[in-house]
Image (cartoon, rainbow, N blue to C red):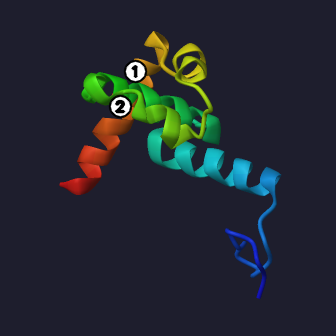
Amino acid sequence: MHDYFWASYHGRPMVDGGIYLTIRRRTREVLGFPVNPHHFRRAAATLWSSRDPANVRGVKDLLGHASFSTTEKHYIMAQSRGAGRALARVIDGKRK
Protein backbone atom coordinates (compact mmCIF):
# COMPACT_ATOMS: atom_id res chain seq x y z
CA MET A 1 0.00 0.00 0.00
CA HIS A 2 1.19 3.53 -0.70
CA ASP A 3 -0.07 7.12 -0.70
CA TYR A 4 0.69 7.87 -4.35
CA PHE A 5 -1.90 8.56 -7.02
CA TRP A 6 -0.71 6.03 -9.61
CA ALA A 7 0.71 2.59 -8.97
CA SER A 8 2.98 0.73 -11.36
CA TYR A 9 2.33 -2.82 -12.55
CA HIS A 10 4.59 -3.89 -9.72
CA GLY A 11 2.39 -2.27 -7.05
CA ARG A 12 4.90 0.47 -6.31
CA PRO A 13 4.24 4.17 -6.78
CA MET A 14 4.99 5.61 -10.21
CA VAL A 15 7.42 8.50 -10.17
CA ASP A 16 7.25 11.57 -12.44
CA GLY A 17 9.51 10.15 -15.13
CA GLY A 18 7.60 6.87 -15.24
CA ILE A 19 4.26 8.62 -15.57
CA TYR A 20 5.61 10.86 -18.33
CA LEU A 21 7.07 7.95 -20.31
CA THR A 22 3.95 5.82 -19.86
CA ILE A 23 1.65 8.57 -21.13
CA ARG A 24 3.90 9.17 -24.16
CA ARG A 25 4.07 5.43 -24.91
CA ARG A 26 0.31 4.89 -24.59
CA THR A 27 -0.61 7.94 -26.66
CA ARG A 28 1.83 6.79 -29.37
CA GLU A 29 0.09 3.38 -29.37
CA VAL A 30 -3.40 4.89 -29.58
CA LEU A 31 -2.85 8.04 -31.66
CA GLY A 32 0.21 7.10 -33.68
CA PHE A 33 2.33 9.86 -32.15
CA PRO A 34 3.49 10.57 -28.59
CA VAL A 35 1.79 13.28 -26.55
CA ASN A 36 3.39 14.61 -23.39
CA PRO A 37 1.12 15.28 -20.41
CA HIS A 38 1.41 19.06 -20.62
CA HIS A 39 -0.12 19.05 -24.10
CA PHE A 40 -3.36 17.78 -22.57
CA ARG A 41 -3.57 21.03 -20.56
CA ARG A 42 -3.16 23.12 -23.72
CA ALA A 43 -5.62 20.96 -25.63
CA ALA A 44 -8.22 21.30 -22.85
CA ALA A 45 -7.85 25.09 -22.81
CA THR A 46 -8.06 25.37 -26.58
CA LEU A 47 -10.99 22.96 -26.85
CA TRP A 48 -12.89 24.87 -24.17
CA SER A 49 -12.17 28.21 -25.87
CA SER A 50 -13.47 26.95 -29.22
CA ARG A 51 -16.50 25.08 -27.88
CA ASP A 52 -17.63 27.50 -25.17
CA PRO A 53 -16.00 30.90 -25.78
CA ALA A 54 -18.54 32.71 -23.60
CA ASN A 55 -17.27 30.82 -20.55
CA VAL A 56 -13.60 30.48 -21.48
CA ARG A 57 -12.48 32.18 -18.26
CA GLY A 58 -13.31 28.90 -16.49
CA VAL A 59 -10.15 27.46 -18.02
CA LYS A 60 -8.19 29.51 -15.48
CA ASP A 61 -9.74 27.50 -12.66
CA LEU A 62 -9.39 24.19 -14.50
CA LEU A 63 -5.66 24.76 -14.87
CA GLY A 64 -5.21 26.31 -11.41
CA HIS A 65 -3.95 29.68 -12.60
CA ALA A 66 -4.11 32.80 -10.43
CA SER A 67 -5.05 35.03 -13.37
CA PHE A 68 -6.70 34.53 -16.74
CA SER A 69 -3.89 36.42 -18.45
CA THR A 70 -1.54 33.50 -17.76
CA THR A 71 -4.08 31.09 -19.23
CA GLU A 72 -4.64 33.24 -22.29
CA LYS A 73 -0.95 33.90 -22.90
CA HIS A 74 0.37 30.37 -22.51
CA TYR A 75 -2.50 27.96 -23.07
CA ILE A 76 -5.06 29.29 -25.52
CA MET A 77 -3.04 29.17 -28.72
CA ALA A 78 -4.08 28.95 -32.35
CA GLN A 79 -1.64 26.11 -33.04
CA SER A 80 -3.24 24.03 -30.29
CA ARG A 81 -6.61 24.10 -32.03
CA GLY A 82 -5.56 21.15 -34.14
CA ALA A 83 -4.66 19.19 -31.04
CA GLY A 84 -8.03 20.02 -29.49
CA ARG A 85 -9.85 18.88 -32.63
CA ALA A 86 -7.84 15.66 -32.73
CA LEU A 87 -8.61 15.02 -29.07
CA ALA A 88 -12.33 15.64 -29.67
CA ARG A 89 -12.32 13.18 -32.60
CA VAL A 90 -10.65 10.52 -30.47
CA ILE A 91 -13.13 11.07 -27.64
CA ASP A 92 -16.10 11.03 -30.04
CA GLY A 93 -14.73 7.84 -31.67
CA LYS A 94 -14.48 6.12 -28.28
CA ARG A 95 -18.08 7.02 -27.45
CA LYS A 96 -19.50 5.33 -30.58
Q: Give the amino acid at mark 2.
A: Trp
| Image position, residue 42 (x, y; %) | 52, 29
The residue sitting at 28% across, 53% down in the picture is: 94
* Quarter of the figure that contains the N terminus: bottom right
Q: Horizontal placement of 22 versus 84: left or right?
A: right
Residue 55 seen from this side: yes
Query: Which type of secondary structure does the marked residue at label 2 adopt?
Result: helix
Check the image and name the residue furthest to the left. 96
Residue 40 seen from this side: no
Quadrant in the picture for residue 87: top left
Q: Horizontal placement of 30 versus 39: left or right?
A: left
Query: Which type of secondary structure does the marked residue at label 1 adopt?
Result: helix
| Image position, residue 28 (x, y; %) | 56, 42
* Residue at image mark 1: 82
Q: Horizontal placement of 68 versus 53: left or right?
A: right
**Separation of residues labelled 1 and 2 (CA atoms):** 13 Å
| Image position, residue 9 (x, y; %) | 70, 76
Check the image and name the residue furthest to the front. 66
**Residue toward you, 95 or 31:** 95
Q: Which mark is residue 24?
A: none
Location of residue 72 with respect to 35 vertically, above or below: above
Q: Horizontal placement of 52 versus 2: left or right?
A: left
Q: Which mark is residue 48?
A: 2
Check the image and name the residue furthest to the bottom. 1
Q: Give the amino acid at mark 1.
A: Gly
The residue sitting at 46% across, 48% down in the picture is: 30
**Residue toward you, 59 or 20:** 59
* Quarter of the figure that contains the C terminus: bottom left
